[in-house]
Amino acid sequence: MILTFYCQHCGELVPRNPRIKKQKFCSSRVCQNTRRNTTNKARANKSSECRSLRRSRNKRWRDNYPAHEYQKDYRKNHSDYVKRNRELQKERNNNRKPEPSKMIVKTYALSPQPLQDGLYRGFEVKDGKIVKTYTLMAQMHALSGNGSLFTSKPV
């Protein structure tokens, strides 16, 4: 039988306790707390009852301590943080503004782009947005007569 082992937490070579068959942690308080926490977390993740109890406990706590109130109080008490955050956010916003040459789609509304004969796709793009927010598919058919029929279906 092997008389020593390496602790999984601290990594030290320690003598094995003969009463513990698969010993992985040494007897120090920190390593035992780690072992206990690891075991409890593994047990809690396996048990659906424990998960539901944890979920209800967390919901109760969030109802009593809403996050927006905490943030509001924090900002009120830490004016330096608020000032620095505003400056950094302005920098992030300036870095985020796309240059006209770097726009991915056209910036004017409902620009028709032909897909095939008689079928067009139009994009509605709001100011500064890069991604299309609405697409209109239109198909035109020629009629034997005075004009054409315009049908559209949103995609």
Image: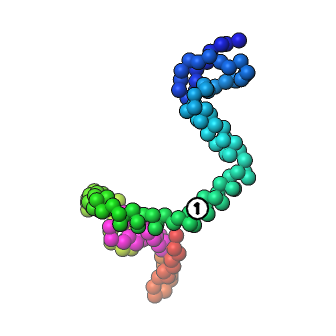
**Disc 1 crowd, CA 10 A, few/some/many (<14, 14-19, 20+):** few
User: What's the residue at 69%, 56% (across, down)?
Assistant: 52
Quarter of the rendering containing residue 85: bottom left
- Snapshot colouring: rainbow
- The answer to whether 30 appears left or right of 18 in the picture is left
User: What's the residue at 68%, 46% (across, down)?
Assistant: 44
Can residue 117 be found in the magenta stretch? yes
Q: Pick whichever, 131 or 75, lies toward us.
A: 75
Q: Pick whichever, 65 or 151, lies toward us.
A: 65
x, y percent for residue 16: 65, 18
- Residue for badge 1: 61
Quarter of the rendering containing residue 72: bottom left
Which quarter of the image is occupied by the N terminus?
top right
One can see residue 57 in this view: yes
x, y percent for residue 64: 56, 66
One can see residue 118 in this view: no
- The answer to whether 128 appears left or right of 67 in the picture is left
Q: Which residues are magenta?
A: 114-138
Direction bottom: furthest residue: 146
User: What's the residue at 71%, 44% (across, down)?
Assistant: 46
